[in-house]
Amino acid sequence: MKTTKYCDFRRQKTYRKNIKDEWIQRVIDYSIGKEVQSDGRIKI
């Protein structure tokens, strides 16, 4: 799965270390909407 440096940085936080790649991919695959923010990040 392709990620941004920002995403990689945020996932290093202790309270986010347990988030699995499969969970993120599932959210992407089954999202009901997508919004590109002004800084280029994608909000799902």
Image (cartoon, rainbow, N blue to C red):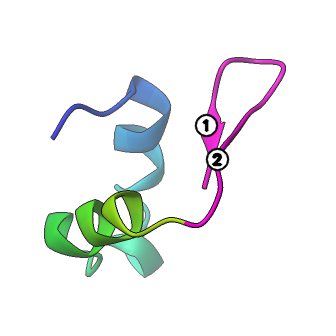
Which residue appears at 39% of the width and 27% of the height? 4
Q: Which residue position is annotated with label 1?
A: 42
Q: Position of residue 6 (x, y in %)?
A: 49, 32
Secondary-structure class at tag 1: strand
Up-down relation of residue 23 to residue 39 (above or below) = below
Identify the amino acid type marked 1: Ile
Q: Earlier in the sequence, mark 1 or mark 2?
A: 2
Up-down relation of residue 16 to residue 43 (above or below) = below
Which residue appears at 43% of the width and 63% of the height? 13
Say whether residue 22 is magenta. Answer: no
How packed mark 2 is, by other alpha carbons closer than 10 Å (few <14, some 14-19, many 20 or more), is: few
Which residue appears at 50% of the width and 65% of the height? 31
CA separation, marks 1 and 2?
Answer: 7 Å
Up-down relation of residue 44 to residue 15 (above or below) = above
Indicate left or right for 10 with 39 as reference: left
| Circle 1/circle 2 CB separation < 8 Å | yes
Using the image as rendered, state which of residue 10 and residue 34 is in the foreground. Answer: 34
Q: Position of residue 5 (x, y in %)?
A: 39, 26
Identify the amino acid type marked 2: Lys
For the C terminus, the image quarter is: bottom right
Secondary structure, magenta segment, majority class: loop
Q: Which residues, given as a range, are shown in magenta?
A: 32-44
Which residue appears at 31% of the width and 33% of the height? 3
Of the numbered discs in the image, which one, if any, rests on residue 34?
Answer: 2
How packed mark 1 is, by other alpha carbons closer than 10 Å (few <14, some 14-19, many 20 or more), is: few
Q: Position of residue 28 (x, y in %)?
A: 38, 57
For the N terminus, the image quarter is: top left
